Amino acid sequence: MTRNTDTGDDSGDAVTDGGVTEDPSGSGFSPIAALNDRFGSDFVESSQFWLPPFLLVGLFVYGAIIWNFLISLTDFSGFGNPNYGDLDLEMYTRALAESGFVDAAVNTFILLVGFTLVTLGLGLGLAILVDRNIRFENTFRTIYLLPMSLSFVVTAQFWAWMFNFNNGVINIVTSSLGLGRVDWLGNPDIVLWAVMFALMWQFAGYAMVVYLAGLRAIPNEHYEAAKVDGASTVRMYWRVIIPQLKGSTISASVVLMVFALKAFDFLYSLVGGYRPPNGADILATKMVREAYANLNWAYASAIAIALFLMTLGIVGPYLYYQYNRGNL
Amino acid sequence: MSDDARTDGGTVSETSAGASDGALSGVDGYRVLLYLGLLGMLAFFLIPIESGLVTSFKTSSGVTGSLPFAPPTGATFTLGKWQAAFDALGRGLVNSALYAIPATVISALLGSFAAYGITQSDWKPKYKAPILALFVAGIFIPYQAVLVPLSQFWSMVPLEESLGFLWSLGINDDYVGIVELIVTHVAYGLPICTVLFRSYYKNMSEEMIEAARLDGASIRRIYRRIVLPLSGPMFAVVLIYQFTQIWNDLLFTLVLVQTESSAAAPIVLILAGLGTSLEGQDFALRMAGAFIAALPTLAVYIAFGEEFAEGVAT
């Protein structure tokens, strides 16, 4: 942050001069000069670059969220238009009283925490394996990351087949181990964990890439110092290396949690419809179902606000953390 | 250097076992275990894909009658499912490309503009920070939080009427959904594009730009002459990442195009309902369809794996 401010001020002086000599029209036009005075010498001239994208994002992202909140206060459902004259919190009280909403919120939370933890764990393991000076490193890395390039719609097809009761790979393995067949997607107590497993398969490569970058940023002296101390490999990682991966862990968890909140595409494609398997309903699927299958627009908007607040609870502290470290 | 340190680290545990000399340890127990672990994980990541691939070549009796990971034999081998999947998905392939490619290019360009305007020009950091924070936070917004307004917005905008000249050319007016998808994906893809470009521009050499500014070059000219030509590597990263994201996304297609019977239905929308009917599920067809839908992103990934990894890691 300090570095940034310094360079900003330095070049700022240089350019103020350049700007004045170059731009004769600027002297006559006082509003622009006033804006530049207030915000910095290039504010107006640079706005042709950042302002249009910023307005687009402002309208579609932040404008839409505010609009969504307004709709959630109405009683809008079915066809027609929302009536903005009659605003209340009815949809929120209705949500809290509905067991379907509470179940979906609990499932969302379980998926969020469980998926993030197992994916980080597997990703860290993969990163350490790949970082051990192996041959064909690129090939291993490429294949581990490959599922990440696939669509949720595609991986859902694969996993619907993997979890198939009669012919799926998973049940072939469990029954050959003498554990018998399990109805992975049909049993409401299990299905969420099966989904978590499939999502872990898809995103472990991502966690690996983030951790690998973190591992490579650790100076060699730390490895050597641990070696001189006579620490075993396991002990070296546990005591010396992993504590230094805090930054990687934080940024990877934020991204993974947000992915878990968005797992709608996967669950929709798994069954080819708005109703996910019993026991795997999360807020993301419930919101879309209420809106586009049941036409309960206002209620869906209220669920969306709940989802948004969950995201904010994760991303807000993260942004603050990044801001304090000068990364913003 | 780092390699040395780590190889040695591995050998330490080995010497404690007693036998081998670090220099000679081509094959030692530790390395064998390491590679076994690596290969085991390789199998873990490839089995769902392998099982899908062999299944897509099987007849219906082959699907139920053989192990899911065993290749089809003579009598159970068929290309019919691929043919059927291609017949169902072919138009979706074209439709997806129609919005994925323009949306990718436009969002990358606008993201580069925004990042340049914020990063390489001089105005006060305390005013830049909130604007940047809004871009960064925009990456993480769950799309559900904007869906209902988005539907409302597109139903209020008279896009279909204003594009009348297209429909008079004989283009099916379902394709208004493609235009909506382009604008929507650009708007929601912009935050990540901006942040990716920003991290690149922040580390760009400042001497050249400052020299150009002292010569009186305008901000627009500096972008065209210096920054844009130097942005090539980052454009590769952003274009690949964005293309994959947009091609793979289902939610917006579901909301904006709605039905797979629409003439403008993207491939993911058709695939999501493929092979599922009242009589049961045709898994061979679903697998073949999955591969056809994944082909463009797989090709991009295999050709540009490094850039993709860089995109996701940032």
Image (cartoon, rainbow, N blue to C red):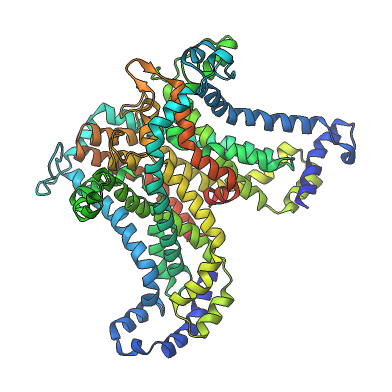
Residue at 12 percent of width and 49 percent of height:
A84
Quadrant in which residue A279 is drawn: top left
Count of marks, rendered view:
0
| Residue found farthest to the front | B169
> Residue A105's quadrant in the figure?
top left
Where residue B164 sits: x, y (%)? Answer: 21, 53
User: Does residue A247 appear to the left or right of B258 in the view shown?
Assistant: right
Residue B12 position in % (x across, y down): 82, 39
> Where does residue A297 sit, x and y in percent of width and height?
20, 39
Relative vertical location of residue A81 with respect to residue B203 in this rendering, above or below: above
**Relative to B67, residue B24 above or below:** below
Q: Residue at x 78, y 32 (%)?
A: B30
The answer to whether residue A235 is left or right of residue A88 is: right
In this picture, residue B298 sits left or right of residue A281: right
Percent x, y of residue A268: 36, 31
The answer to whether residue B151 of the structure is visible from this angle is yes
- Relative vertical location of residue A189 with respect to residue A283 in this rendering, above or below: above
Q: Nearer the viewer, residue B18 or B166?
A: B166
Residue A244 visible, this orientation: no
Q: Residue at x 71, y 38 (%)?
A: A235
Q: Is residue B113 above or below residue B38?
A: below
Q: In the figure, is residue B55 to the left or right of B132?
A: right
